[in-house]
Image (cartoon, grey):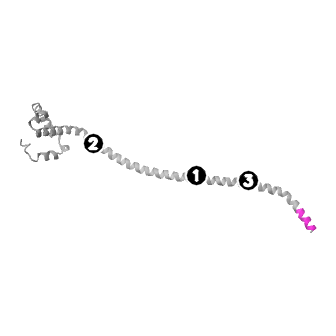
């Protein structure tokens, strides 16, 4: 009754740090909760008939006892999770850096491809001009060759015209 008469009991129960419960406390609590002499008297239904406040305290004690063993299995997993999350965060930072490098490389490749396309178009234009100039040169050579025979004839005609006039 002394425990139930404590006006700060609820505050103490609410502020109890279940993560800091040591094994000695839980072992002693387990001995009390699972003692064959007390098991029948600590059933929720039996305690509820005596006092609803006691029922809540017994439920809280059973919860603390169960939580300790669950938390004992979960703690290493939480630690591993925290470590994995830290590792993932570091890897995400590295990934972001690599993605920046990749983006820069892709942009450079795209610029080089654009320059290549421009250079290929310019080359094709020059080849076309070369072909056109080659054709014009062939025609000019033919024209000069064909007119070469006319040179002699025009020269004689010029002499005749000089003499005649």
Q: Residues within 10 Å of mark 3 (few under 14, many from 20)?
A: few
Q: Residue at x 32, y 44 (%)?
A: 84
Per the rendered image, the range of residues in magenta is: 155-164
Mark 3 = which residue? Answer: 135
Q: Residues within 10 Å of mark 1 (few under 14, many from 20)?
A: few
Left or right of 64 in this view: 77: right
Task: Please state the horizontal and vertical placement of residue 157, each as a whole percent of the image.
Answer: 90, 63
Name the quadrant of the C terminus: bottom right
CA distance for labels 3 and 1: 27 Å
Labels 2 and 1 touching (C-beta < 8 A):
no
Mark 1 = which residue? Answer: 117
- SS class of the residue under badge 3? helix
Whether the magenta-drawn stretch holds residue 83 is answered as: no
Labels 3 and 2 touching (C-beta < 8 A):
no
Q: Residue at x 11, y 39 (%)?
A: 52
Q: Is residue 43 visible?
A: no
Q: Residue at x 83, y 58 (%)?
A: 147
Q: Is residue 30 above or below residue 150?
A: above
- SS class of the residue under badge 2? helix
Residue 78: mark? 2
């Amino acid at each position: 009754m002394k425990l139930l008469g404590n006006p700060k009991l609820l505050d103490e129960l609410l502020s109890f740090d279940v993560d800091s419960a040591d094994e000695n406390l839980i072992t002693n609590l387990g001995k009390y909760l699972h003692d064959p002499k007390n098991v029948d008297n600590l059933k929720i239904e039996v305690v509820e008939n005596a006092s609803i406040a006691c029922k809540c305290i017994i439920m809280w004690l059973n919860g603390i006892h169960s939580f300790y063993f669950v938390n004992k299995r979960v703690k290493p997993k939480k630690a591993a999770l925290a470590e994995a999350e830290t590792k993932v965060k570091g890897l995400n930072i590295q990934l972001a850096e690599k993605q920046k490098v990749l983006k820069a490389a892709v942009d450079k490749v795209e610029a080089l491809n654009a320059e290549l396309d421009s250079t290929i178009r310019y080359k094709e234009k020059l080849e076309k001009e070369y072909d056109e100039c080659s054709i014009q040169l062939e025609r000019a050579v033919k024209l000069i060759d064909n007119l070469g025979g006319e040179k002699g004839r025009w020269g004689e005609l010029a002499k005749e015209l000089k003499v005649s006039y």
